[in-house]
Image (spheres, grey):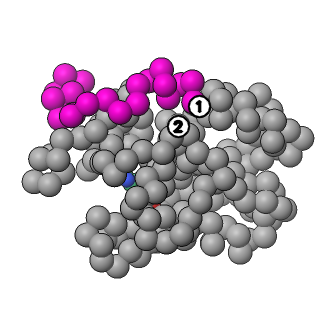
Amino acid sequence: MKGMRSDIVRILLTRREIASKVAELGKKLSREYAGLEPLMVCVLKGSAIFFSDLCRQMDIPVQMDFIAAASYGRHSGSSGEVRLIKDLDVSIEGRHVLVVEDILDTGLTLHYLTEMLRSRKPASLKVCVLLDKPGRRRVAFEPDYFGFVIPNEFVVGYGLDYAEMYRNLPDICILKEEIYKK
Ligand code: IMP
């Protein structure tokens, strides 16, 4: 943890701020999905920690499944192509589906995933993101639920990575530019 901390400019959102927002979202979702037994869909890997905390803040019966996508050229501004790496295990036809993602950035990943999932005819399909970076959108996309709107900074921690590192930082932190620009 000590080595990782020296790569950080500052903490953007503390673990306490995150926990209280996740509790608030969990309460809201429990009300809105009461009686619907939603299928909570975790978008791997970044959402894993948020997803597990959020599900535990919901006091209604839920089911869980996992999906993963990869995108190319997100930062270079090139292709923006997204592809599926891991599909859901269950059918979502007629189900109330809530996609849970760590961060909405260009919008390409969630645009792709929601189009694909909608074609499978769920009873409803909504999206909950912890972080929204509206300044970097390349396709129009609005989340149904969000935790925090953040500025155009590259953040790590609480599941979010740079090159597969920093996911286990408990706070959401701004990474030093020299780390991801070298
Ligand atoms: P989008 O397709 O550009 O909206 O990006 C969504 C994915 O990009 C997220 O699931 C993250 O994995 C990644 N991402 C976007 N911004 C950041 C960031 O600031 N830190 C870490 N990962 C990010």
SS for callout 2: helix
- Residue bearing the label numbered 1: 22
Q: Are marks 1 and 2 in contact (CB under 8 Å)?
A: yes
Ligand 1 resides in the quarter of the picture at bottom left
Mark 1 or mark 2, earlier in chain = 1
In the rendered image, the quadrant that contains the N terminus is top left
Instruction: Give the CA distance from mark 1 to mark 2.
Output: 8 Å
The answer to if 51 sits in the magenta stretch is: no
- Residue 7's x, y, as percent? 17, 35
- Residue lying furthest right: 35
Residue 88, relative to residue 117: is it above or below?
Answer: above
- Residue 75's x, y, as percent? 29, 64
* Label 1 environment density (alpha carbons within 10 Å; few <14, some 14–19, many ≥20): many
Identity of the residue drawn at 48% across and 20% down: 16
Image quadrant of residue 175?
top left
Residue 69, relative to residue 116: is it above or below?
Answer: above
* Label 2 environment density (alpha carbons within 10 Å; few <14, some 14–19, many ≥20): many
In front: 170, or 21?
Answer: 21
- Residue lying furthest bottom: 79
- Residue 174's x, y, as percent? 28, 39
| Magenta stretch in the rendered image | 1-21
Identity of the residue drawn at 39% across and 67% down: 71
Left or right: 137 with respect to 7? right
SS for callout 1: helix
What is the total number of numbered labels drawn onto the structure image? 2
- Residue bearing the label numbered 2: 50
Task: Name the amino acid type tagged 1.
Answer: Val
Image quadrant of residue 126?
bottom right
Task: Name the amino acid type tagged 2.
Answer: Phe
The answer to if 2 sits in the magenta stretch is: yes
Mark 1 or mark 2, whichever is nearer to me: 1
